[in-house]
Image: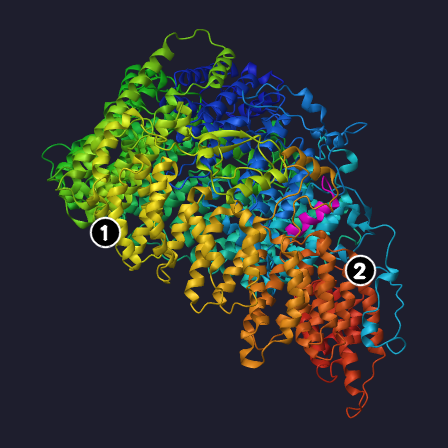
């Protein structure tokens, strides 16, 4: 049967059963709307008709109506979630949502999400839907919709920071932040002023948390459309705060601002008036601040400034942050760690907010969107890095002999002749120029030899730069681009950008870090699209040597990846017309990459081939195709020898600046090249076959290792792409080669591989493939079966196949592969195949045999019955077959399509195919079903043969049904729908609110339930299901170990029956991932509109899968399905682990498809937990329940939770350890899902929701509105809440009974207490028994029990107070207490004086009588640092005798009474203190313990005080640390609670406490010091110190009177420790004491000899400077601050960042250090000197400051001390001081100094270098220049850089060689970013100096001076060479070979310096030598070789 079968009946455009082309509905095809056009393109891409838009809009209206009804009825938790999910499913179908509905729905979701108290899971769903509705800026803008900002802020500001007694952390803050970020663009810009007046006063300087929170509010809420009024303010804030977290958010914010405002019209102030302001909250004002300074006379010009929208001042600051963000490590002991160190002060709650985007991507966006032609262009450059463009030198420097000495010569001014009148910039772009400089400065850190964690950041930065540039470039090519033409990117900028980045990208290409390589690939791809001629050739030049040599695998892989990245330039003619001619040579070089022994290389090679093959056709381009087919034998040799003659690339590949070929010449070259495709394809197939032949033997489970499987998949994927794009002659050649190999070889190790190989050729042409292989395979299979193949009965998947069966398996694999594509090709072999299937069923008895046979049937049926694309070629079918394409297909390479131009070919089952599929079922499968029925009949002997027959028969049936997931559409009878609703997992809901889906068109072959064919297959499937149920019951009764294989097959069959439907073979989520991945690979730039055709094929498949998914969401669950679910539940609890695991996995999958399953399964699982149950069965039940799908349902549904908990606690009966572990795991899962019941949300009326609901309903086009649904739904919701409340009460009683039972194990009692803690509710009171049990557990012997019980008491007391003081339900959910003593006090005068007055009041003793009448107390300073609010919260003092809060809420009377009986008994406190005083290995008090005591005394005032007194007295009397800790905890809680006691009671407390304070202050023990320190921290936290006057008086008195030089170190340390706790907790409130405290300490610094004391003093100095730091606006109002930041000069210190508070003390130190230095003790006693001790104090103090948020203020203190700090560094008899000083100076360099101090700081460093008599000081300070320069260079002026060079040059004349070398190293670092003219001047200067230096005789007195002069010149020249590590400037070859080489053999140290320089040059230029060597002449290369000590490297 060599001839082809008759295929005349086949038609490639056969429309299938429906007939005709798919009809696109009129209302989709004829609507001009853009989004309808997109839907039209989707509709055209499918082979069947989709529903009209009108029909789907009706469905949308129904969904929206249900959503509105749910919200109206407040049915949030059930109904709203149901219909919200329906909306997300509807959105998958790509129908557009009309704008008015989108607006109404978005508003509704917004108000639902921002209703206080809304359950978090509802908010989570609402957030996602809101984001989906609002994410498109084109679909909705602020002109369409406005939203209020305050609802979000109110919830967020209340939830963000927890009180000390709050432990319940929720996701509310994250959700609110997420909503704010997504809806910010709908906040009206006129709200900006009010937002600022709200957020700015919240910022309190000493508190980083308040600063970060206020910053988050501003950067998240402020509308960014009109930022002109507040941008200067943000920059002034940013400059003053040292925080990495602060930087992150600022960079993200400014990146968004920069991107948005390239369009100048966005910020036009006139728009504010034009936008309707209709979304204002009731309490929302609209202050209109004075902005006259922003007015413009003419048309609004936009926000453009010096660089983009930034001033030059701000731009330089951003670039400094950019450089710091790369985290480049210098030898600087972590100078960049000051910001992260300061961030340690931030509270953990800030991590609950959404994280900012990565700063690297933000920086890239800022830079790219700040680019514009805004400067004078620098002349173009041909050098790799254009920043290095040289200029002619006009220097005239005197020789050293003429004027002064060598130092004067070296440091002669460079700047005299280089000042240019006009500053030029790269490509005329300031931002690009800054970027190029920055890249040049970090160039060396891209090299693999200098890589580290920073390389990821650097490479990512480059990736994002080119990504953003490409994106912006193409945005500006669009006709609707709003960027003015004079602000757009230019081709020159694009080219210079690529030149700037090319060097570093090519350096990082060989990195060994996978992340870096991925970043480089992305960069290369973008750059090759931007400027392909600049990128492709350098990559090719690196690729050829690496691929030819194949020496280093890593380098080979790197170049293959790089080639993959630049593939568009190789094959896409529209990207680079000249690139294609290199393709074949590269492909030939890559052939050895197919290597079994090197999987990574193979993966890279195949990825490259896939990338290339999808864009081209493999075929010869001639005028006529050859008449004779290509001889397949031409490639035969390669199969055996795997060798191929490779034509090498030309040695010099043309560069962009060389002559180019014309397009016609390029085409000619390409046509000639195409003749080599046949050889290459043959050779590639040979390599593939060779790889397959060498695969290791497959395991028993028919597959090899994961790597080998991946290898086969990768190689097959590449080969498949090649086959698809072969010309017909080449395809015939390949088909023949594959057939020859398959027919002549049989290899057991390659069975899977041969299947995939044949699949590849079948995918390209199934007709030819089947014609070739089917007769051959059919004959071989029959022969093998006749000779006994697969006759040995096996059923285990672990059984090893017999060698004699290999031929059968080989041919089955081939035949299955041939069945891969287009079922119509199988029709001519219909009878032959059915006969073969019958034979296989009858003859295959081995596991592998019948499994392979079943898979063959499955593949055949899937090919026949499924709807799928037939091909994914690079062009449309009509183009592929056109004559022009055949002759000139190179013109089409890389072609991109618009979506409307794509034509797809689908396989749609024809009538014949359906009949063939049904015939297989009738003739093959149906008889097997009958056989299975007979096997299960009673009385049949169930031996091994029976088991084998059962497995193989069932395998055939299962595989057959798995092959028809889309053959017949499933219809659910109405009665089953009704029953499903009744038995739904959704409990207590009206039927209308349980969503159901109507099936849609999705390519099912049989869609008419009246069709006999449909009825037949559905009835047959029903019989299959019934058989499975019978088999399940039968096998369970049998219950033998030998039936495990049969059970496994049964479970797999049930999975097939229940789940193989709809999208099971085209999984929606899998297709979504593949579509996304393929889009990412195909994307050339962001916002791309044209794509390769293959991507449209994938998109069509994705859309098809979405429609299948819709039909698969709701599955039929009738009685049979329920029976099978019951069966699987039973198997999940069977004896054998493998069966249990498979069943549990299936149950999890079924939960996602079958509603009601969990509700049905739970009773069976619970029953298995009862006593007497077999252990294995119990384990199965526990493990099944532990699935989150079951546990969270059972515990989260209030009416089911009681049963779940009962069953869980009843499991105590089984003490087996493994079962108890299962129970513990299940308990944790349940407890994590068990939340506090709270239904306050149903009492909250949100008028905005009502308005939004009415608006949504109004825009729905409904024929009739169902009356009464809302009322019924509301009634059901009320009943549901009542049931939930009743259930909660039942659960509480159940748990109390369990917990109290003496039979309850302690572990279960702990679970009970945890649940009881959760059941303490804010919306209902707690029962007396509940609270009494918990209070008694606070002294339980189990520590964990006490922990949870105490937290329960704390929670309960919070809620008692809350329920008493809350006025509305909103207060309850937001935990807003309306304290009766709180008063809102208006701020009379927002001035600094008023602030000082408020702070001074804290030091004045309180007049208690006045305090009861007037609000004088303020515990928390809420504003007044940067600005005052309109009002501040002050408190009255409590009444003298009347309780502040009592009586408590009535509902708690019984509970509190029960509690009182316990806590007024001394025995309670005795028991409690016993546990508090137990040894617990901690030195500090427990906040939980103190808060528990506080909670009790807050509830009962001083009632329990008498009972507590004796216990405290006894504990205080005991000196034991643990007893003291217990006393401290009790007292801390007592004092904390006394805040609101009647003042008489407070006075009594302090009267009693006063004598005991002496005990506390008299401890003087290191053991108890941390205990009492944390006690003071606890009581002073957020407290007005006047409330604790006795403590304050004691602490202050002790501090003022202590002898700092007393004999007892512990006494002074204790006083200072307590004092530190006092001032740190007070924060700003300590301000009135600061001056006295600092004065007290300052007087002691020179006298105190205790190191610990000095450390405390340094901390006080740090704290005082931070506390006294405050901004300096003219008045403390937000308006004044924002305005003055905008209008005042930058020299005005509005943020108060200059260090003035300690200025006098610093000046005093400077003078006193001179005296102390002279008095310094010599030798070993030096460290005891005042000079050293104060020096260490100063270093500690300044070091702490430099790591604080106000680090910038430190420079004013460091500057006067610089000379002394430098002296410290040289002390050789006090290493501690020297190291501290050195570390301080280095860390200082990482902080951005105030601009006015930059030059003075540098001058101070220069003075230290030039004036210091010690060479050690110079040696340590010189590197500091480089560190400071590297960290701050964007801020340093060019003139200062030149001065810096001059200073360093002078150091090269130093007498000490180490200093000279250090100066040279520093110089090379500085020169990388220096003005290029100065570089050339230095070159000339050093060369002249060298030429004029001659060495006299060694005995000559002038020898040393001459040697130093020559060494200085050599060092200077080496510094110049080292400053260009990866490029070769045009003057460099002569400098190396004509100057340095002459001194190779000079005396040391000259010769060593020269050799080291040459060695470094070799190392850094090794990778680019093929390019760099062209800059040397032959003579220079020879000289260089000599210089490298005879190395032949450059020969």
Q: Which residues are magenta?
A: 308-322
Q: Is residue 1251 above or below residue 1570?
A: above
Q: In terms of depth relative to the viewer, which is nearer, 1030 or 692?
A: 1030
Q: Residue 511, position in %: x, y?
A: 57, 59
Which residue lies at the image location 59% right of the left edge and 27% below the top edge? 187
Q: Return the disc, 1 or 2, that comes first in the chain's sequence.
A: 1
**Mark 1 closeness class: few <14, some 14–19, many ≥20 residues within 10 Å:** some
* Quadrant in the picture for residue 1136: top left
Count the numbered circles shown. Answer: 2
Question: What secondary structure prevails in the magenta region?
Answer: helix
**Mark 2 closeness class: few <14, some 14–19, many ≥20 residues within 10 Å:** some
- Write down the residue under mark 2: 1876
Q: Tell me if 1097 is positioned left or right of 71 in this view.
A: right
Q: Is residue 19 above or below residue 1439?
A: above
Question: Where does the N terminus fall, quadrant-wise?
Answer: top left
Q: Tell me if 780 is positioned left or right of 1705 in this view.
A: left
In this view, the mark in front (1 or 2): 1
Q: In terms of depth relative to the viewer, which is nearer, 1870 or 938?
A: 1870
Question: Where does the C terminus fall, quadrant-wise?
Answer: bottom right
Whether residue 207 appears in this view of the structure is no
- Write down the residue under mark 1: 1474
Q: Residue 258, position in %: x, y?
A: 67, 38
Q: Residue 951, position in %: x, y?
A: 23, 40
For the residue labelled by badge 1, is the local secondary structure a helix, a strand or a loop?
helix
For the residue labelled by badge 2, is the local secondary structure a helix, a strand or a loop?
helix
Q: Is residue 1194 above or below residue 1311?
A: above
* Colour setup of the view: rainbow
Q: Is residue 310 magenta?
A: yes
Q: Residue furthest bottom?
A: 1899
Which residue lies at the image location 41% right of the left edge and 30% below the top edge? 1377
């Amino acid at each position: 049967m060599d001839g082809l079968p008759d295929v005349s009946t086949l038609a490639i455009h056969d429309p299938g059963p429906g007939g005709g082309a798919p009809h696109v509905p009129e209302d989709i095809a004829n609507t001009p709307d853009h989004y309808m056009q997109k839907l039209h393109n989707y509709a055209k891409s499918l082979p069947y008709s989709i529903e009209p838009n009108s029909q789907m809009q009706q469905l949308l209206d129904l969904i929206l109506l249900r959503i509105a009804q749910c919200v109206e009825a407040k049915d949030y938790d059930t109904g709203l979630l149901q219909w919200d999910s329906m909306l997300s499913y509807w959105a998958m179908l790509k129908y557009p949502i009309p704008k008015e509905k989108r607006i109404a729905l978005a508003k509704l979701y917004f108000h639902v999400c921002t209703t206080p108290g809304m359950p978090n899971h509802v908010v989570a769903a609402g957030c996602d839907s809101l984001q989906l509705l609002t994410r498109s800026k084109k679909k909705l803008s602020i002109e369409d919709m406005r939203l209020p900002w305050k609802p979000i802020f109110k919830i967020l500001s209340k939830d963000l920071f927890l009180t000390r007694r709050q432990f319940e952390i929720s996701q509310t803050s994250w959700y609110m932040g997420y909503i704010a970020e997504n809806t910010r663009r709908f906040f009206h810009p006129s709200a900006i002023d009010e937002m600022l007046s709200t957020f700015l006063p919240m910022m309190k300087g000493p508190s980083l948390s308040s600063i970060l929170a206020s910053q988050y509010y501003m950067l998240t809420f402020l509308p960014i459309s009109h930022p002109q009024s507040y941008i200067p303010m943000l920059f002034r804030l940013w400059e003053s705060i040292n925080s990495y977290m602060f930087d992150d958010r600022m960079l993200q914010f400014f990146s968004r601002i920069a991107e948005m405002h390239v369009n100048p019209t966005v910020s036009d102030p006139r728009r504010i008036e034009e936008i309707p302001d209709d979304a204002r909250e009731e309490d929302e004002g609209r202050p209109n601040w004075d902005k006259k300074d922003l007015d413009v006379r003419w048309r609004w010009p936009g926000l453009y400034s010096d660089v983009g929208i930034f001033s030059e001042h701000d731009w330089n600051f951003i670039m400094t942050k950019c450089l710091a963000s790369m985290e480049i490590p210098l030898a600087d002991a972590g100078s960049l760690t000051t910001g992260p160190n300061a961030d340690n002060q931030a509270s953990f709650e800030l991590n609950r907010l959404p994280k900012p985007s990565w700063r690297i991507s933000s920086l890239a966006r800022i830079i790219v969107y700040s680019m514009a032609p805004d400067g004078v262009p620098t002349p173009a450059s041909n050098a790799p890095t254009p920043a290095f463009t040289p200029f002619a030198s006009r220097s005239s420097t005197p020789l050293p002999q003429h004027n002064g000495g060598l130092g004067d010569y070296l440091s002669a001014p460079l700047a005299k002749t280089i000042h240019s009148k006009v500053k030029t910039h790269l490509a005329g772009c300031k931002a690009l120029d800054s970027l190029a400089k920055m890249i040049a400065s970090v160039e060396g850190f891209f090299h693999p030899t200098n890589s580290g964690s920073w390389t990821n950041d650097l490479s990512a930065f480059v990736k994002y730069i080119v990504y953003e540039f490409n994106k912006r470039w193409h945005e500006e090519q669009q006709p609707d681009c709003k960027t003015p033409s004079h602000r757009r990117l230019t081709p020159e900028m694009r080219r210079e950008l690529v030149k700037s980045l090319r060097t570093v990208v090519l350096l990082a290409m060989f990195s060994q870090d996978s992340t870096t390589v991925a970043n480089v690939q992305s960069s290369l791809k973008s750059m090759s699209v931007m400027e392909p001629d600049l990128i492709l050739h350098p990559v090719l030049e690196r690729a050829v040597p690496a691929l030819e040599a194949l020496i280093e695998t890593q380098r080979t892989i790197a170049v293959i990846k790089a080639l993959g990245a630049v593939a568009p330039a190789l094959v896409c003619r529209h990207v680079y017309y000249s690139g294609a001619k290199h393709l074949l040579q590269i492909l030939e070089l890559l052939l050895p990459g197919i290597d079994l022994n090197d999987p990574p290389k193979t993966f890279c090679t195949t990825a490259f081939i896939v990338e290339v093959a999808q864009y081209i056709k493999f075929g010869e381009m001639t005028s006529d195709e050859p008449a004779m087919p290509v001889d397949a034998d031409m490639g035969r040799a390669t199969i055996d020898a795997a060798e191929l003659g490779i034509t090498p690339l030309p040695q010099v590949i043309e560069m962009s600046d060389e002559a180019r070929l014309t397009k016609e010449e390029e085409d000619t070259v390409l046509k000639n090249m195409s003749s080599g495709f046949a050889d290459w394809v043959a050779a590639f197939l040979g390599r593939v076959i060779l790889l397959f032949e060498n695969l290791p033997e497959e395991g028993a489970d028919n597959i090899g290792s994961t790597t080998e499987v991946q290898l086969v998949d990768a190689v097959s994927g590449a080969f498949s792409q090649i086959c698809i794009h072969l010309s017909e002659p080449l395809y015939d050649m390949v088909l023949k080669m594959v057939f020859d190999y398959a027919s002549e070889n049989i290899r057991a190790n390659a069975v899977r591989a041969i299947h995939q190989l044949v699949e590849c050729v079948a995918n390209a042409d199934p007709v030819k493939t089947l014609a070739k292989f089917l007769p051959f395979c059919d004959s071989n299979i029959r022969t093998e079966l006749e000779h006994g193949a697969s006759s040995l009965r096996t059923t285990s998947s672990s059984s090893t196949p017999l060698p004699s069966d290999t031929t059968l398996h080989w041919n089955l694999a081939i035949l299955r592969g041939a069945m891969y594509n287009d079922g119509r090709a199988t029709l001519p072999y219909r009878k032959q195949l059915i006969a073969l299937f019958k034979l296989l069923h009858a003859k295959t008895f081995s596991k592998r045999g019948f499994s392979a046979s079943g898979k063959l049937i499955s593949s055949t049926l899937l090919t026949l019955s499924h709807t799928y694309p037939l091909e994914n070629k690079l062009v449309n079918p009509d183009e592929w077959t056109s004559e022009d394409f055949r002759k000139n297909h190179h013109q089409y390479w890389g072609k991109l399509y618009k979506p409307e131009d794509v034509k797809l070919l689908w396989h749609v089952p024809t009538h014949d195919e359906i009949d063939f599929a049904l015939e297989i079922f009738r003739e093959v499968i149906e008889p097997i079903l009958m056989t299975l029925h007979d096997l299960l009949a009673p009385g049949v002997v169930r031996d091994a043969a029976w088991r084998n027959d059962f497995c193989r028969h069932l395998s055939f049936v299962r595989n057959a049904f798995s092959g028809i997931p889309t053959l017949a559409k499933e219809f659910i009878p109405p009665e089953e729908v009704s029953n499903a609703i009744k038995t739904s997992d959704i409990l207590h809901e009206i039927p209308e609110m349980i969503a159901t889906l109507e099936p849609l068109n999705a390519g099912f072959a049989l869609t008419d339930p009246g069709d006999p064919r449909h009825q037949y297959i559905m009835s047959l499937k029903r019989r299959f299901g019934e058989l499975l149920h019978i088999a399940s019951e039968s096998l369970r009764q049998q219950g033998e170990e030998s039936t495990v294989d049969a059970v496994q097959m049964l479970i797999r069959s049930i999975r097939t029956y229940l789940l193989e439907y709809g999208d099971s073979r085209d999984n929606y989520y899998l297709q979504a991932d593949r579509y996304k991945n393929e889009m990412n690979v195909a994307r050339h730039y962001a916002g791309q509109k044209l794509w390769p055709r293959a991507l449209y094929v994938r998109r069509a498949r994705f859309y098809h899968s979405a429609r299948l998914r819709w039909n698969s969401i709701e599955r039929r669950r009738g009685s049979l399905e329920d029976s099978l679910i019951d069966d699987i539940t039973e198997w999940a609890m069977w004896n054998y682990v493998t069966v249990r695991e498979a069943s549990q996995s299936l149950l999890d999958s079924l939960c996602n498809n079958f509603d009601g399953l969990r509700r049905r399964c739970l009773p069976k699982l619970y029953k298995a937990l009862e006593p007497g149950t077999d252990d294995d069965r119990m384990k199965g039940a526990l493990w099944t329940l532990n699935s989150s799908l079951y546990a969270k349902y059972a515990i989260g549904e209030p009416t089911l939770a009681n049963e779940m908990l009962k069953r869980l606690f009843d499991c105590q009966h089984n003490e087996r350890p493994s079962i108890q572990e299962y129970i513990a795991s299940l308990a944790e899962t349940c407890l994590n899902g068990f939340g506090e019941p709270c239904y306050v949300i149903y009492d909250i009326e949100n008028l905005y929701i009502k308005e939004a609901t009415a608006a949504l309903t109004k825009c729905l086009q409904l024929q009739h509105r169902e009356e009464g649904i809302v009322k019924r739904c509301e009634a059901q919701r009320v009943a549901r809440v009542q049931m939930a409340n009743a259930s909660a009460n039942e659960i509480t009683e159940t748990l109390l009974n369990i917990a109290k039972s003496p039979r309850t194990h302690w572990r279960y009692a702990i679970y009970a207490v945890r649940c009881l803690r959760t059941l303490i509710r804010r919306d209902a009171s707690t029962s007396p028994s509940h609270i009494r049990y918990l209070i008694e557990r606070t002294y339980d012997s189990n520590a964990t029990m006490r922990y949870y019980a105490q937290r329960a008491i704390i929670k309960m007391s919070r809620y008692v107070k809350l329920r008493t003081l809350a006025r509305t339900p909103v207060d309850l959910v937001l935990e807003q207490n309306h304290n009766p003593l709180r008063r809102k006090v208006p701020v009379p005068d927002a001035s600094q004086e008023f602030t000082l007055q408020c702070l001074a009041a804290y030091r004045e003793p309180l007049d208690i009588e006045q305090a009861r009448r007037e609000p004088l107390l303020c515990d928390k300073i809420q504003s007044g640092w940067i600005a005052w609010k309109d009002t501040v919260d002050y408190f009255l003092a409590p009444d003298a005798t009347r309780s502040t809060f009592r009586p408590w809420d009535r509902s708690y009377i019984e509970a509190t009474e029960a509690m009182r009986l316990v806590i007024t008994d001394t025995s309670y406190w005795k028991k409690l203190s016993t546990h508090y005083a137990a040894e617990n290995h901690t030195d500090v008090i427990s906040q939980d313990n103190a808060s528990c005591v506080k909670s009790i005394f807050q509830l009962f005032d001083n009632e329990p005080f008498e009972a507590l007194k004796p216990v405290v007295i006894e504990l205080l009397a005991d000196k034991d640390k643990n007893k003291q800790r217990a006393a401290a905890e009790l007292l801390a809680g007592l004092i904390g609670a006394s805040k609101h006691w009647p003042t008489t009671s407070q006075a009594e407390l302090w009267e009693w406490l006063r004598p005991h304070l002496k005990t506390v202050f008299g401890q003087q023990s290191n053991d108890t010091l941390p205990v009492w320190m944390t006690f003071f921290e606890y009581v002073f936290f957020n407290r007005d110190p006047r409330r604790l006057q006795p403590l304050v008086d004691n602490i202050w008195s002790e501090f003022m009177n202590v002898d700092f030089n007393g004999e007892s170190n512990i006494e002074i340390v204790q006083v200072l420790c307590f004092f530190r706790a006092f001032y740190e907790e007070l924060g700003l409130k300590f301000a009135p004491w600061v001056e006295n405290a600092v004065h007290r300490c300052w007087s002691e610094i020179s006298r105190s000899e205790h190191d610990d004391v000095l450390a405390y003093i340094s901390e006080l100095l740090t704290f005082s400077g931070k506390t006294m730091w405050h901004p300096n606006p003219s008045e403390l109002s937000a308006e004044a601050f924002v305005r003055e930041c905008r209008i005042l000069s930058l020299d005005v210190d509005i943020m108060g960042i200059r260090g003035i508070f300690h200025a006098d003390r610093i000046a005093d130190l400077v003078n006193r250090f001179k005296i102390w230095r002279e008095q310094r003790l010599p030798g070993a006693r030096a460290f005891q000197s005042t000079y050293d001790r104060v020096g260490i104090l100063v270093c500690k103090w300044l070091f702490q400051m430099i790591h604080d948020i106000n680090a910038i203020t430190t420079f004013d203190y460091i500057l006067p001390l610089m000379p002394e700090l430098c002296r410290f560094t040289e002390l050789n008899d006090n290493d501690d001081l020297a190291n501290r000083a050195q570390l301080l100076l280095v860390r200082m360099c990482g902080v951005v100094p105030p601009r006015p101090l930059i030059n003075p700081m540098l001058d101070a460093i220069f003075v230290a270098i030039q004036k210091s008599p010690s060479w050690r000081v110079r040696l340590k300070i010189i590197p500091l220049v480089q560190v400071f320069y590297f960290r701050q260079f964007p801020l340093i002026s060019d003139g200062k850089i030149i001065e810096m060079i001059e200073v360093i040059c002078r150091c090269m004349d130093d007498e000490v060689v180490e200093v000279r070398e250090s100066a040279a190293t520093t110089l090379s670092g500085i020169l990388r970013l220096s003005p290029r003219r100065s570089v050339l001047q230095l070159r000339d200067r050093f060369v002249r100096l060298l030429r004029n230096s001659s060495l006299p005789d060694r005995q000559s007195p002038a020898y040393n001076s001459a040697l130093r002069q020559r060494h200085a010149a050599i060092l200077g020249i080496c510094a110049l060479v080292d400053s260009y590590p990866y490029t070769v400037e045009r003057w460099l070859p002569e400098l190396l070979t004509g100057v340095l080489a002459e001194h190779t053999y000079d005396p040391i140290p000259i010769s060593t310096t020269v050799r080291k320089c040459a060695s470094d040059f070799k190392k850094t230029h090794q990778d680019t030598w093929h390019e760099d060597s062209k800059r040397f002449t032959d003579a220079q290369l020879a000289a260089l070789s000599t210089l490298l000590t005879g190395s032949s490297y450059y020969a």
